[in-house]
Amino acid sequence: MEKEIGCGLVNHTFLVRSGSYRAVIRVNCANPGKLGIDRLRELKILEAVKNSDFVPDTLYKDSGVLVTEYISGYTLNDEFLGSPVNRSRLASVLERIQTMFVTGLNPFSYLDCCKAYARDLPYDPSEFVDWEQLCAVAMEIDKARHAPVLCHHDLVAENILIRDDAIFFIDWEFAAMGHPAYDYVKLFGEDISRGMLAQRDISSGDIKQINFLQSGIDRLWYSAKKIMRRQGKSGV
């Protein structure tokens, strides 16, 4: 082992070396369901995208461990994201992801996701989110006419690596068959031209709703994460 490169609540991640070759070993957390992670779903998705040039090579995977190629690049930053050319490159990767076909996956329910996070909280979620509105928006998005597509669902800067002219998306734990605008909104916010979207019939209203939904889900997730951390420290 060269070093530990991640020691969060969700997983422990290690950088290992064999000669000049380096790989990343991710040891998964014990209770992924409490954070909205379905390991079997993740394994199916990793299998579907394994030959794509926007993901690191997978060397080994099971429900407890994931071993991947180490990407020696830098994470997405504002300078990269501010370039129209680079934004177009990122949008192109999203469009390719949405063409991926994954068998045996049901459409992701954003309403069920919200309720699952809220269920484990020891307090009313209305204390920090507009719970009634969040559920209404999640339900409306679940019933949207758009066919579900493969979504990464966690495109924070740390999960996008840039190496030379290549872009890699890592950490597919939350990926599922979701709304076709979700990843675009996560990356670009509401500042999305219709021409950037793989599906052109998505309205500005859809984008506003998804932006609101993402904010609410993020708050619920971080609250669930804090509860798990406290329980871990107390030995519960």
Image: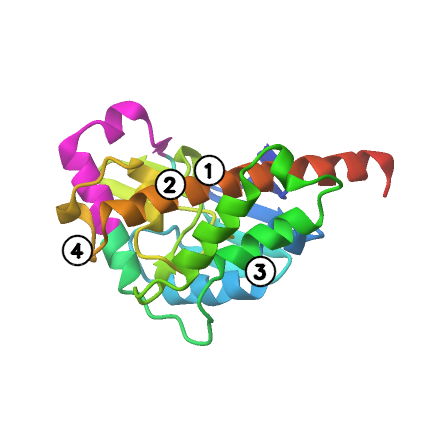
Q: SS at mark 3?
A: loop
Please tell me how many numbered marks the rendered image carries. 4
Query: In the displayed structure, would residue 54 be above or below residue 128?
Result: below
Q: Amino acid at mark 1?
A: Ser
Dot 2 and dot 1 residues touching (CB under 8 Å)? yes
Residue 35: where, in percent of width, then height?
62, 49
Q: Is residue 157 magenta?
A: no
Residue at mark 1 to residue at mark 4: CA–CA distance: 24 Å
Tell me which numbered mark, 3 or 1, is placed earlier along the sequence: 3
Circle 4 SS class? loop
| Amino acid type indicated by mark 3 | Asp
Residue situated in front as seen by the camera: 149 or 204: 204
Name the element at disc 1.
helix
Q: Which residues are magenta?
A: 73-93
Q: Which mark, by number, is residue 211?
A: 2
> Which residue type carries mark 2?
Asn
Q: Is residue 128 visible?
A: yes
* Residue pointed to by mark 3: 38
Q: Amino acid at mark 4?
A: Arg
Dot in front, 4 or 3: 4
| Of the image marks 2 and 3, the number of the one nearer the N terminus | 3
Question: Which one is nearer the viewer's eye here, 186 or 31?
Answer: 186
| Disc ID at residue 215 | 1
Q: Are marks 4 and 2 in contact (CB under 8 Å)?
A: no
